[in-house]
Amino acid sequence: MSENMCRSVMFSRIGDASVLELITEPERKPSIGEVRIAVEAIGLNRAEVMFREGTYLEQPEFPARVGYEAAGVIEAVGEGVSGFEVGDRVSTIPAFSMGTHGVYSEKAIVPAHSVARYPENLSAKEGSSIWMQYLTAYGALIDIAKLEPGQVVLITAASSSVGLAAIQVARAVGATVIVTTRGTAKLEALRVAGADHVISTDSENLVERVTAITAGAGAQVIFDSIAGPIIEELATAAASGAMLIEYGALDDRQTPFPLYQALAKGLTIRGYTLFEITQDAKRLNKAKAYIYEGFETGALVPVLDRNFAFEDVADAHRYMESNQQLGKITLTL
């Protein structure tokens, strides 16, 4: 590939993974406040599937770029950028519009405020698997819920990269960790990942299991990416005064409000995205310090699942939609 050209992934209509197109385009120059990264690895997120399908918080404007997380080396710096220089090994923090700055590209251009150096002992694949998962987990469990030692946290869909990050964060706090998964294929892997208790929702009653585990007290913090009808079970399994944090919508059915449980228990039910953290410089700096410390102590360790070649991005999306993964799906260039 010519040094003045690069390959990027874009899409021009809503649809399944087949709408993702690998195009060749002229290499772009970073504008004021931007940097250009020679990408080595890309971390995939469910948000990108939803964006492609038109069900995300942001609607695509065509032709649209896609992608939040990439790791690589800065090769160009725009005007007004300080703190970074050519040659820095960095990864991207989700703090920008995917449609404008999507990082599925050999040469990603992103705002300088949305990049950070990653530890030298991590590979590029691991570097591309840091910020979405750990910022999301930290923001919910530490910044918002203020999880404490001895409390019980319930994490749904725990085999996702965010779910695994939440397990690690909760264990670092000293909380009791209950997780859910469908089926039995991932039960042992989730125990190995650090969960104290694993519930298979296909064969076990979630409320009965949580009630038994907590001796009737319920979970003080619930971190849910599913939504839909399960919210009523989660509210029933919640402790008095519990906080139920909704950060996803894997179930596209209507999500009811569990009014009577909320009234009886004084529940706090709130929506959340990591943009609460990434768009607030003070909170983001605290989060980054927490995550860097976790890497140093070994409390936080990115879990990688399967890697695909860059040109196989559509297959990588299909694999994510199959829900087979345990951890982060990556692309390498």
Image: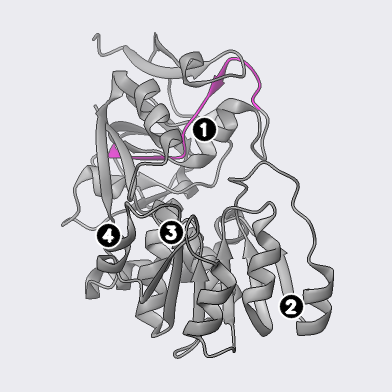
Judged left or right of residue 84, residue 255 is right
> What amino acid does circle 2 point to?
Leu
Q: Which mark is residue 189?
A: 4
Q: Are marks 4 and 3 in contact (CB under 8 Å)?
A: no
Question: Which residue in the structure is indicated by mark 1?
Answer: 49
Q: Which mark is residue 10?
A: none
Closer-to-camera residue (151/121): 151
> What amino acid does circle 4 point to?
Ala
Q: Are marks 3 and 2 in contact (CB under 8 Å)?
A: no
Question: Which residue in the structure is indicated by mark 2?
Answer: 267
Closer-to-camera residue (316/274): 316
Which region shows up in magenta? 60-73
Mark closest to the chain's N terminus, 4 or 3: 3
Residue 94 horizontal/vertical position (percent): 50, 46
At a point 32% along the width and 67% down the height, the residue shown is 292
Mark closest to the chain's N terminus, 1 or 2: 1
Q: Which mark is residue 158?
A: 3
Front position among marks 4 and 2: 4
